[in-house]
Image: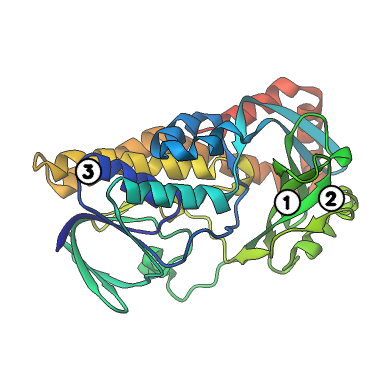
């Protein structure tokens, strides 16, 4: 069978593209090497700009996932003994990837997507049509979307094969935290230290114990600084003290290496979405939003190709242009802010003093990291 579209990777970006394309009438095959539900290293922060898109993608049965989600209206940054605060307006939602990915996957299947799990793609050939080779089968498709994530062999440029960039890793787990130790207003808290940072935010309030919250602790850290969450917590005094009363609720998961590249939304005729297109620094909290929106953009730009009204290269050019116009600014803003935050302490001190005394500037920087 020749599919209109094959998508490699069933996370938010791949699912968004699959659902959108299937609803346009395309025959879609979605291949995922893992199995849902599962935990993923992620801040689990869904910015308000993408909640309406997410609501449209999900089946009605999953509406409570958005309706009942904790709203995050404030961000706090702990760095060099200072606490910087910024409003998140409109508020974001806190949704566990364990629930979100599974809901998107099942919504795709309901939309007519041929969704297959535990399938690893071994190679891709052609520039349209494409031939996809797995361990057990081969597939053909008119168009191909790569949603395989930040560090797949499918994403390596020839010059990167065999290289060893500075190694950063991501690690995450859920913990139970007494509500008495949380602020009255839910916030996403970012603890910065030399060689990394850790984000903490509530995901749910326990049904069994209303005085206990389930919090997500997700860190990005240089491999020579720490390789576990315990090692991460030890890097920041306030985070170390806060975590002492936590109880582990999920096995820690990790991913490595985390590699920053200039975004590349298309290569050799293959559309790239989510982290496969470009890995935005997680501290800006817009990764899920970028994934959902890039998947939707790719599907929309392919619509005329599926209808026989344009060629695949034309659709790819439209997607690259749309991606750069609507999403690239987030990568630029996060890169600039990251460079400022990792400066030596004596250099960044005046910058932090300005932010601490001028909340309006801090709020402006937060707005610049939104993709809406």
> Relative to the observer, which residue lies in front, 223 or 124?
124
Quarter of the figure with the N terminus:
bottom left
Q: Which residue is mark 2?
A: 239
Q: CA distance from mark 2 to mark 3?
A: 46 Å
Other residues around mark 2 within 10 Å, as few (<14) / some (14–19) / many (≥20): many
For this orientation, the residue located farthest to the left is 308
Instruction: Say which label, 2 or 1, has the lower sequence index.
Output: 1
Note whether 8 is above or below 309 in the view shown.
Answer: below
Q: Which mark is residue 224?
A: none
Residue 146 coordinates in the image, percent (x, y): 34, 57
> Are the residues flagged by discs 1 and 3 in contact, CB closer than 8 Å?
no
Instruction: Say which label, 2 or 3, has the lower sequence index.
Output: 2
Residue 197 coordinates in the image, percent (x, y): 72, 52
Residue 260 coordinates in the image, percent (x, y): 53, 55
Residue 340 coordinates in the image, percent (x, y): 68, 42
Q: CA distance from mark 1 to mark 3?
A: 38 Å
Q: Secondary structure at mark 1?
A: strand
Other residues around mark 1 within 10 Å, as few (<14) / some (14–19) / many (≥20): many
For this orientation, the residue located farthest to the front is 208
Q: Which residue is mark 3?
A: 302
- State the image quarter where residue 157 is shown: bottom left
Q: Which residue is mark 1?
A: 198
Name the residue rendered at 53%, 60% in the picture. Answer: 259
């Amino acid at each position: 069978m020749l599919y209109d579209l094959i998508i490699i990777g069933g996370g938010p970006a791949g699912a968004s593209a699959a659902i959108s394309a299937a609803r346009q009438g395309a025959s879609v095959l979605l291949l995922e090497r893992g199995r849902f539900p599962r935990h993923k290293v992620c801040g689990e922060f869904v910015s308000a700009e993408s909640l309406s898109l997410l609501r449209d993608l999900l089946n009605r049965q999953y509406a409570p996932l958005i309706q009942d989600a904790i709203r995050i209206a404030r961000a706090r940054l702990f760095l060099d003994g200072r606490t910087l605060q910024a409003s998140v307006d409109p508020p974001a939602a806190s949704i566990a990837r364990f629930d979100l990915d599974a809901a998107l996957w099942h919504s795709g299947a309901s939309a007519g997507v041929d969704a297959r799990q535990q399938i690893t793609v071994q190679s891709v050939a052609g520039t349209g049509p494409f031939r996809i080779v797995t361990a057990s089968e081969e597939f053909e498709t008119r168009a191909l979307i790569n949603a395989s994530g930040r560090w797949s062999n499918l994403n390596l440029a020839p010059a990167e094969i065999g290289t060893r960039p500075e190694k950063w890793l991501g690690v995450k787990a859920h913990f139970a935290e007494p509500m008495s130790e949380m602020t009255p207003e839910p916030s996403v808290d970012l603890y910065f230290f030399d060689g990394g940072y850790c984000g903490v935010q509530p995901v749910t309030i326990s049904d069994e114990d209303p005085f206990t919250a389930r919090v997500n602790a997700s860190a990005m850290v240089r491999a020579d600084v720490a390789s576990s969450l315990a090692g991460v917590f030890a890097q920041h005094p306030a985070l170390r003290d806060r975590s002492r009363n936590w109880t582990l609720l999920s096995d820690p998961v990790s991913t490595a290496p985390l590699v920053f590249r200039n975004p590349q939304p298309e290569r050799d005729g293959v559309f790239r979405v989510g982290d496969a297109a470009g890995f935005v620094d997680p501290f800006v909290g817009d990764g899920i939003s970028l994934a959902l929106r890039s998947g939707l953009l790719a599907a929309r730009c392919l619509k005329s190709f599926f209808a026989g009204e344009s060629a695949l290269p034309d659709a790819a050019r439209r997607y690259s242009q749309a991606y750069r116009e609507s999403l690239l600014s987030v990568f630029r803003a996060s890169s600039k802010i990251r460079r400022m935050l990792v400066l030596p302490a004596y250099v960044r001190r005046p910058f932090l003093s300005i932010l601490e005394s001028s909340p309006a500037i801090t709020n402006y920087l937060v707005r610049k990291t939104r993709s809406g």
